[in-house]
Amino acid sequence: MMTDDDNADSVAEGMGFELLASSLRADLSDEGAFLEALATKLSGALPHRVTIQRGGGLFSHTHPIQRMSVNLGDWEYDIHAEHGGTLAAARTHAVRGIALKSEPMSVDEWIETLGEELALLARHSAQDRAALQRLLG
Protein backbone atom coordinates (compact mmCIF):
# COMPACT_ATOMS: atom_id res chain seq x y z
CA MET A 1 0.00 0.00 0.00
CA MET A 2 1.35 3.44 -0.97
CA THR A 3 1.60 6.10 1.68
CA ASP A 4 1.31 9.83 1.11
CA ASP A 5 5.12 10.04 1.32
CA ASP A 6 5.47 7.40 -1.43
CA ASN A 7 2.99 9.32 -3.55
CA ALA A 8 4.90 12.57 -3.00
CA ASP A 9 8.18 10.83 -3.93
CA SER A 10 6.63 9.46 -7.15
CA VAL A 11 5.30 12.88 -8.11
CA ALA A 12 8.64 14.54 -7.27
CA GLU A 13 10.53 11.95 -9.35
CA GLY A 14 8.16 12.45 -12.27
CA MET A 15 8.49 16.22 -12.04
CA GLY A 16 12.29 15.83 -11.77
CA PHE A 17 12.29 13.80 -14.98
CA GLU A 18 10.01 16.32 -16.69
CA LEU A 19 12.28 19.15 -15.57
CA LEU A 20 15.35 17.25 -16.75
CA ALA A 21 13.88 16.49 -20.18
CA SER A 22 12.77 20.12 -20.50
CA SER A 23 16.23 21.31 -19.52
CA LEU A 24 17.90 19.03 -22.06
CA ARG A 25 15.47 20.12 -24.79
CA ALA A 26 15.78 23.88 -24.08
CA ASP A 27 18.03 24.84 -26.99
CA LEU A 28 16.71 22.44 -29.66
CA SER A 29 15.70 25.17 -32.17
CA ASP A 30 19.36 25.65 -33.28
CA GLU A 31 20.83 22.15 -33.57
CA GLY A 32 24.48 23.27 -33.41
CA ALA A 33 23.86 25.38 -30.32
CA PHE A 34 21.70 22.60 -28.88
CA LEU A 35 24.51 20.04 -29.17
CA GLU A 36 27.01 22.46 -27.59
CA ALA A 37 24.63 23.32 -24.73
CA LEU A 38 23.71 19.68 -24.16
CA ALA A 39 27.37 18.64 -24.09
CA THR A 40 28.20 21.45 -21.66
CA LYS A 41 25.33 20.49 -19.33
CA LEU A 42 25.92 16.75 -19.38
CA SER A 43 29.73 16.79 -19.29
CA GLY A 44 29.64 19.32 -16.45
CA ALA A 45 27.24 17.19 -14.41
CA LEU A 46 28.44 13.70 -15.40
CA PRO A 47 32.05 14.00 -16.65
CA HIS A 48 32.76 10.31 -15.97
CA ARG A 49 29.85 9.24 -18.21
CA VAL A 50 30.14 11.65 -21.17
CA THR A 51 32.51 11.44 -24.16
CA ILE A 52 32.70 14.31 -26.65
CA GLN A 53 34.32 14.28 -30.10
CA ARG A 54 35.00 17.63 -31.71
CA GLY A 55 35.63 18.47 -35.35
CA GLY A 56 37.68 21.14 -37.04
CA GLY A 57 41.26 21.00 -38.17
CA LEU A 58 44.46 21.82 -36.37
CA PHE A 59 44.35 25.44 -37.53
CA SER A 60 40.59 25.84 -37.38
CA HIS A 61 39.21 28.60 -35.17
CA THR A 62 36.17 26.56 -34.26
CA HIS A 63 35.93 23.00 -33.02
CA PRO A 64 32.23 22.11 -33.14
CA ILE A 65 30.98 18.98 -31.46
CA GLN A 66 30.57 16.16 -33.95
CA ARG A 67 29.50 13.41 -31.56
CA MET A 68 28.57 13.00 -27.92
CA SER A 69 28.05 9.73 -26.08
CA VAL A 70 26.58 9.18 -22.62
CA ASN A 71 27.48 5.83 -21.07
CA LEU A 72 24.88 4.55 -18.61
CA GLY A 73 26.16 1.04 -17.99
CA ASP A 74 24.49 -1.37 -20.41
CA TRP A 75 23.20 1.47 -22.60
CA GLU A 76 25.19 4.10 -24.44
CA TYR A 77 23.31 7.11 -25.79
CA ASP A 78 24.87 8.69 -28.87
CA ILE A 79 23.98 11.90 -30.68
CA HIS A 80 25.93 13.32 -33.60
CA ALA A 81 25.77 15.93 -36.31
CA GLU A 82 25.40 14.49 -39.79
CA HIS A 83 26.59 16.20 -42.97
CA GLY A 84 24.44 19.29 -43.37
CA GLY A 85 24.20 19.80 -39.62
CA THR A 86 21.12 17.71 -38.84
CA LEU A 87 21.26 15.64 -35.69
CA ALA A 88 20.98 11.85 -35.53
CA ALA A 89 20.49 9.98 -32.28
CA ALA A 90 20.64 6.36 -31.20
CA ARG A 91 21.20 4.18 -28.20
CA THR A 92 23.23 0.99 -28.13
CA HIS A 93 22.88 -1.94 -25.75
CA ALA A 94 26.26 -3.43 -24.91
CA VAL A 95 27.37 -6.24 -22.66
CA ARG A 96 31.04 -6.46 -21.66
CA GLY A 97 31.92 -3.96 -24.37
CA ILE A 98 30.17 -5.83 -27.18
CA ALA A 99 27.35 -3.95 -28.90
CA LEU A 100 24.33 -6.24 -29.11
CA LYS A 101 21.65 -3.89 -30.41
CA SER A 102 21.56 -0.35 -31.75
CA GLU A 103 18.30 1.61 -31.89
CA PRO A 104 18.08 4.76 -34.01
CA MET A 105 15.79 7.33 -32.35
CA SER A 106 14.40 10.77 -33.02
CA VAL A 107 16.17 13.51 -31.04
CA ASP A 108 13.01 14.06 -28.96
CA GLU A 109 12.74 10.35 -28.16
CA TRP A 110 16.48 10.27 -27.33
CA ILE A 111 16.06 13.16 -24.87
CA GLU A 112 13.01 11.54 -23.25
CA THR A 113 14.70 8.14 -22.91
CA LEU A 114 18.00 9.58 -21.70
CA GLY A 115 16.13 11.71 -19.15
CA GLU A 116 14.25 8.66 -17.87
CA GLU A 117 17.48 6.64 -17.59
CA LEU A 118 19.27 9.49 -15.79
CA ALA A 119 16.37 9.85 -13.33
CA LEU A 120 16.44 6.08 -12.70
CA LEU A 121 20.21 6.16 -12.24
CA ALA A 122 19.89 9.02 -9.76
CA ARG A 123 17.51 6.94 -7.63
CA HIS A 124 20.23 4.30 -7.17
CA SER A 125 23.41 6.37 -6.90
CA ALA A 126 24.07 9.27 -4.53
CA GLN A 127 26.89 10.54 -6.80
CA ASP A 128 24.66 10.53 -9.88
CA ARG A 129 21.77 12.07 -7.90
CA ALA A 130 24.04 14.97 -6.90
CA ALA A 131 25.17 15.33 -10.53
CA LEU A 132 21.55 15.38 -11.71
CA GLN A 133 20.74 18.09 -9.16
CA ARG A 134 23.68 20.15 -10.50
CA LEU A 135 22.37 19.66 -14.04
CA LEU A 136 18.94 20.96 -13.06
CA GLY A 137 20.55 23.95 -11.34
Image: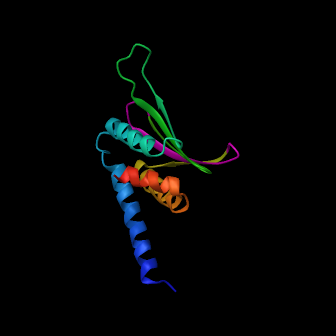
Question: In the displayed image of the protein, which residue is found farthest to the bottom?
Answer: 1
Q: Could you say where residue 89 lies in the image, as x and y percent from the top left? A: 47, 44
Q: In the displayed structure, would residue 72 be above or below residue 17?
A: above
As for residue 89 lying within the magenta part, the answer is: yes
Image coords of residue 42 (percent x, y): 43, 44
Name the foreground residue: 79 vs 42: 42
The answer to whether residue 114 is seen in the rendering is: yes
Q: Nearer the viewer, residue 1 or 98?
A: 1
Classify 135 as above or below 5: above
Look at the image and give the residue range highlighted in magenta. Answer: 82-98
* Coloring scheme used: rainbow
- Residue 16 at x, y = what percent? 39, 62
| Residue 109 can be seen in this image | no
Say which of 134 and 38 sits in front.
Answer: 134
Q: Is residue 88 above or below residue 24?
A: above
Could you say which is closer to the camera, residue 87 or residue 47? 47
Q: Position of residue 49 (x, y in %)?
A: 53, 44
Q: Which residue is at 37% across, 36% downward?
A: 36
Residue 53 horizontal side relative to residue 60, left or right: right
Marker count (numbered): 0
Magenta stretch encompasses residue 54: no
Residue sitting at 47 percent across and 57 percent down? 129
Query: Which residue of the protein is positioned furthest toward the top in this rendering?
Result: 59
The residue shown at (71%, 46%) is 96
